Image: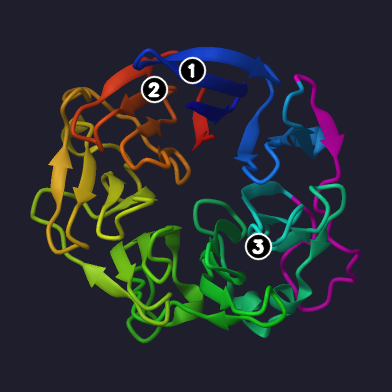
Amino acid sequence: MKAMVATRKGLFEMIHIDGKWELDQISFLGEPLSMCLHDKRDGAVYAALNLGHFGVKLHRRDEGRDDWTEIAVPAYPEHAKTDDDVEWKLKVIWSMETGGGDEPGVLWAGTLPGGLFRSPDRGNSWELVRSLWDREERKEWMGGGYDTPGIHSICVNPRNSQHILLGISCGGAWKTEDGGKNWGLSASGMHAAYMPPDLADKQNIQDPHLIARSKFASHVLWCQHHNGIWRSEDDAASWQQLHLPEGIPDFGFAVAAHPRNPDIAWFVPAVADQKRVPLHGSMSVTRTRDGGKTFESLRNGLPQQDCYDLVYRHGLAVSENGKNLLMASTTGNLWASENEGEDWYQISANLPPIYAVKFY
């Protein structure tokens, strides 16, 4: 078992040997990565870099090789600014996902400022999905944690690669059932308490922090929203808010769905809005095992005092067996669990700030 850790100062790859995680190799040391991706269809690995003045770069490492190849990056077409306040310029690759097993070479990339891109050829070329970008509703989207809106969740249905759900901060959830030719809003039931009451239920201004799909039951989805936790059992046609016990915050960014049991999911709670730290400086993971009817707080092995780590959207991952989890923080802490989150141990406390973790 291996994992990738995308940080502000490089890509750190870990390997699981004899029941523990060890550092395997480092790539792009000193350079900030916004996302990484493993394509299990052909074994390729992708690394998205955000080099500031030098712009966004994208690299691919083919299976069995040690060297990386720089490939194309998504590029917005030239635009004569009219009534669009958003600059048509790539700022960050915030999410990446592979197409289905019946689409070899197809990749998807979600970006700031809110554009979705598709590559038919393993990242050698990209095209903006204009059917979404040109929607009139996009002009209502707004930034969440960033100044501009962004696509952070790309949920490809494992049973039908033409069915894709996106999570956008702040632009709600959008779904296509024809591979991106047509799109519709799919955030019914979500509630934005940060908006005036007459706008709070509007689908197009919702702020889902992350959406995760059950691989076993693809119609089941989980959402960590700015205002709580939601679940859908009808492929995002409707969403139901879940209610946590007193003392467990329902604010956070990360969510991981069990790959084999649609009733199990994990979240990382934090104090909302300006503070964004663990409640009372005590690190925990929230888990449900009954589809959101009840929740429990998992703490064994995690620091329980003077801990102020924040886990970003892509900082929590679960392996294909559903037992191994990795959790990474903006403070450079990396924790692992071998038993579905019951117990945790620290792999490292000295990594750079971590943006994403991925099993492969």
Q: Which residues are magenta?
A: 66-90
On the picture, is 75 further left or further right than 114? Answer: right
Q: Main secondary structure of the magenta part?
A: loop
**Which mark is drawn over residue 351?**
1
Q: How many marks?
A: 3
**Residue 91: x %, y % from top left:** 72, 48
Does residue 238 appear to the left or right of 1 in the view shown?
Answer: left
Q: Residues within 10 Å of mark 2 (few under 14, many from 20)?
A: many
- Disc 3 is placed on an element classified as loop
In x, y percent, where is residue 15? 49, 19
Task: Measure the C-alpha gap from mark 2 to mark 1.
Answer: 7 Å
What label sits on residue 114 in the rendered view? 3
Is residue 91 placed above or below 185 in the rendered structure? above
The answer to whether mark 2 and mark 1 are in CB contact below 8 A is yes
Whether residue 304 is in magenta: the answer is no
Query: Which element type, helix, strand or loop, lies under badge 1?
Result: loop
